[in-house]
Image (cartoon, rainbow, N blue to C red):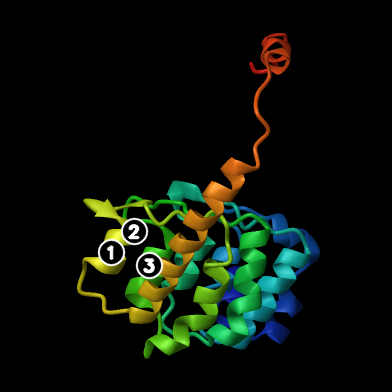
Amino acid sequence: MSLLYAAQKASYEDFVREYTPADATWLSATGRNLLFKSVSNRDVKARVAITMRLLDDGADPSVAPDNVNVLHVLFDQRTHDTAYEAPMLRRLIEDGADINLVSKRSGPPLAVFIQHGPSPESERVPFYDVLFEQPNLDLNAPYGNGTLRDLMFNSAWNLPLLRERVQAYESARNTLQPIRSSTRKPTTQFATEATADTVDCTD
């Protein structure tokens, strides 16, 4: 059994028989690592166990050849137990997977989840929880001829729970913005003059 096959098709027990920790940093000729295989394992328990083991051993979830990352691949799967997978999703993002990465074919990862996530929509909520706790989620990321937000509100996808999350997320951000602005200290002439002497360290 090849390691690639084991990551995508086998149980965790069968995978570790073929695996060494050094394999976690392996890259294919196309620039993909084993995480691209593990997050597409149809057995959800194996998916989570193998992916978490790879992350523990140093696999890089920020790898994104052709602007496709492990989140695009994960959200394209048809079988999910989102409550069980949510800690894995959070770990992938914390370790560097870009939630806003725009694929030419698929758009940002959340667009893939909108189109391929489980039904009923309530089964998507644990993933929503992880995604909307991210302070940098870009709802205006480009998608098709519009934006991710357009896909949520102006398309045939009827996802009321998602729309509620979007509205709450935007409301919270709009509330925080004036607070942050009002707490800024006024700029003094001294500060302005001091800034002018800052060394430019860019190449």
Disc 1 secondary structure class: helix
Q: Are marks 1 and 3 in contact (CB under 8 Å)?
A: no
Question: Relative to 120, does residue 47 appear above or below in the rendering?
Answer: above
Q: Is residue 110 left or right of residue 32?
A: left
Residue 43 pos. (x, y %):
55, 87
Q: How far is disc 2 from disc 3 in space, using C-alphas? A: 10 Å
Mark earlier in primary sequence (1, 3)? 3
Q: How far is disc 1 from disc 2 in space, using C-alphas? A: 5 Å
How packed is label 2: few (under 14 Cα within 10 Å), some, or many (20 or more)?
many
How packed is label 1: few (under 14 Cα within 10 Å), some, or many (20 or more)?
some
Question: Relative to 111, does residue 191 appear above or below in the rendering?
Answer: above
Disc 3 secondary structure class: helix
Closer to the eye: label 1 or 3: 1
Q: Is residue 18 visible?
A: yes
Q: What kind of residue is marked 2?
A: Leu
Disc 2 secondary structure class: helix
Q: Is residue 126 left or right of residue 88?
A: left
Residue 36 pos. (x, y %):
54, 64
Mark earlier in primary sequence (2, 3)? 3
- Depth order, front residue of 44/141: 141
Q: Residue at x 38, y 51 (%)?
A: 141
| Residue labelled with disc 3 | 112
Closer to the eye: label 2 or 3: 2
| Residue labelled with disc 2 | 148
Q: Quadrant of the N terminus?
A: bottom right
Residue 94 pos. (x, y %):
67, 60
Q: Quadrant of the C terminus?
A: top right
Q: Are marks 1 and 2 in contact (CB under 8 Å)?
A: yes
Residue 151 numbered mark, or none:
1
- Depth order, front residue of 126/112: 126
Question: Relative to 82, does residue 21 appear above or below in the rendering?
Answer: above
